[in-house]
Amino acid sequence: MPPQIFRLVLLTLAIIVSYIIARYLLTPASFGQYGFYRAEALAEAATPEPVFAGRKACLECHEDIQEKLLKGEHKTIGCESCHGVGREHAQNPDVKLGKIGDSGCLRCHEDNGARPAWIKVIVVKDHYRGDKCAGCHVPHQPNEVP
């Protein structure tokens, strides 16, 4: 057998052995238990770590805001819809939530043909006067003038 063929066969065997060793070492133990995926993925997907605090957590400290909110049109919207994820803030009040800017308001109120008819929408170029939304509207009671 020519030496080139012998070296080629050795190289092929080395690649195959390397693949088998890597597959053995890198494949999780639960792979294939319930099909062609990792069985532990089911438990991980079933118990994700929550990131939202929920309205009840906000009410522990912000009942006054809740009273205002219940009188306005935003009463069905959760706090975290506008203020972002609040679990860390609920656990430690020193962690500040991000302030929402106009983009937070416009996410729901910018004119878009796909919006339901009951949501009040604006055409930004016609409505916007250079001030932020909160300059004319109180977010927790949008019809009230500050």
Image (spheres, rainbow, N blue to C red):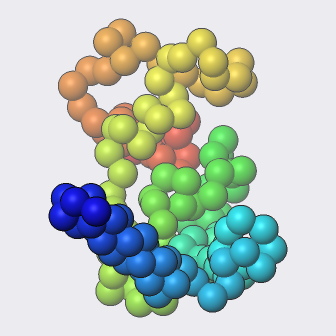
Q: Position of residue 25 (x, y in %)?
A: 47, 87
- For the question of whether residue 46 can be seen, the reply is no
Q: Quadrant of residue 80?
A: bottom right
Q: Position of residue 3 (x, y in %)?
A: 18, 64
Query: What residue do we see at 33% from left, 81% from top?
Result: 95
Query: What residue do we see at 38% from left, 71% from top?
Result: 13
Looking at this rendering, what residue extends furthest in the right direction? 34
Q: Position of residue 48 (x, y in %)?
A: 62, 77
Looking at this rendering, what residue extends furthest in the front direction? 1
Q: Which residue is at the front of the view, 136 or 36?
A: 36
Viewport quadrant of the C terminus? top left
Q: Is residue 84 left or right of residue 43?
A: left
Q: Which residue is at the front of the view, 98 or 138?
A: 98
Q: Up-down: is 27 above or below 97?
A: below
Q: Up-down: is 5 above or below 146?
A: below
Marks counted in the figure total: 0
Q: Which residue is at the front of the view, 90 or 63?
A: 90
Q: Is residue 83 left or right of residue 102?
A: right
Q: Is residue 26 left or right of residue 100?
A: right
Q: Which residue is at the front of the view, 7 or 94?
A: 7
Viewport quadrant of the N terminus? bottom left
Query: What residue do we see at 32% from left, 45% from top?
Result: 101
Q: Quadrant of residue 119?
A: top right
Q: Is residue 118 left or right of residue 29?
A: right
Q: Quadrant of residue 113?
A: top right
Q: Position of residue 144 (x, y in %)?
A: 51, 40
- For the question of whether residue 5 can be seen, the reply is yes
